[in-house]
Image (cartoon, grey):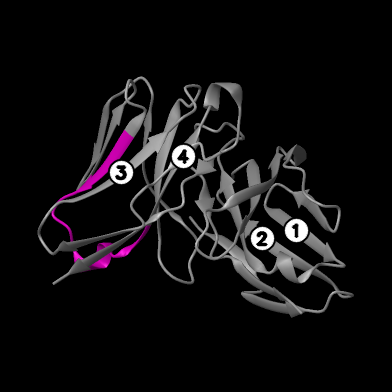
Amino acid sequence: DQQVKQNSPSLSVQEGRISILNCDYTNSMFDYFLWYKKYPAEGPTFLISISSIKDKNEDGRFTVFLNKSAKHLSLHIVPSQPGDSAVYFCAASAAQAGTALIFGKGTTLSVSS
Amino acid sequence: DTEVTQTPKHLVMGMTNKKSLKCEQHMGHRAMYWYKQKAKKPPELMFVYSYEKLSINESVPSRFSPECPNSSLLNLHLHALQPEDSALYLCASSLTGSMANEQFFGPGTRLTVL
């Protein structure tokens, strides 16, 4: 059973618009969430994280929102740029319990100019 | 230096071969990880080393044998692999073994078992 779900395998957005990538989780013990970006033939690159004591974290063009009651988080990229085209993985862990990172299946974002 | 390096980039091996994957970081991180990623799937954790000691082994078959000679190096020794072991093997490191630290990934080794 998947504990971290990214239900949209792909997303297409025009340059300059907002990209919203969604992630749902089932394990209420998860208390730390991360987003990674992956280009082909490269390893995942850490993008942004949020702990369960917050509901929003912002870093430049990237903002992550956490809705604990809905067990849902989202990554907003604004404005989107062609260089943002990549696979985005959501990951979660029960950090206090020391459990490993669990990754979602990823969403492929395509930003067209 | 904010990089995790992995060698080789590509490896093709037969089922009777013995080979090793290598991973190195010089960020002073004390936790290192091996992940396996199959096509169109998320990375799956195999092993975690924390302060050079194996802290997590996710029920990985014994044909995969990790080794952490020092805090900067992590090896994965391979022996008698099966074709279904073909995958991208990713190494990662983090400041400590706490899962509240972001992990930095290397580019991976693309392994093909014939």
The span picked out in magenta is A73-87
Residue at mark 1 = B75
Q: Position of residue A15 (x, y in %)?
A: 13, 64
Distance of label 4 from label 3 (alpha carbons): 11 Å
Label 2 CA crowd tier, 10 Å (few <14, some 14–19, many 20+): many
Residue at mark 3 = A22
User: Is A7 displayed left or right of B83 in the figure?
Assistant: left
Mark 4 or mark 2, which is nearer to you?
4
Residue at mark 2 = B23
In the picture shown, does residue A61 fall above or below A24?
Answer: below
Residues tagged by mark 3 and mark 1 found on one chain of the structure: no
Residue at mark 4 = A4
Q: Nearer the viewer, residue B49 or A15?
A: A15
Counting residues from the start of the chain, the first of labels 1 and 2 encountered is 2
Q: Do callouts 2 and 3 mark residues in contact (Cβ within 8 Å)? A: no
Amino acid type indicated by mark 1: Asn
Secondary structure, mark 2, is strand
Mark 2 or mark 3, which is nearer to you?
3
Q: Nearer the viewer, residue A91 or B41?
A: B41
Secondary structure, mark 3, is strand
Label 1 CA crowd tier, 10 Å (few <14, some 14–19, many 20+): some
Q: Nearer the viewer, residue B87 or B67?
A: B87
Amino acid type indicated by mark 3: Asn
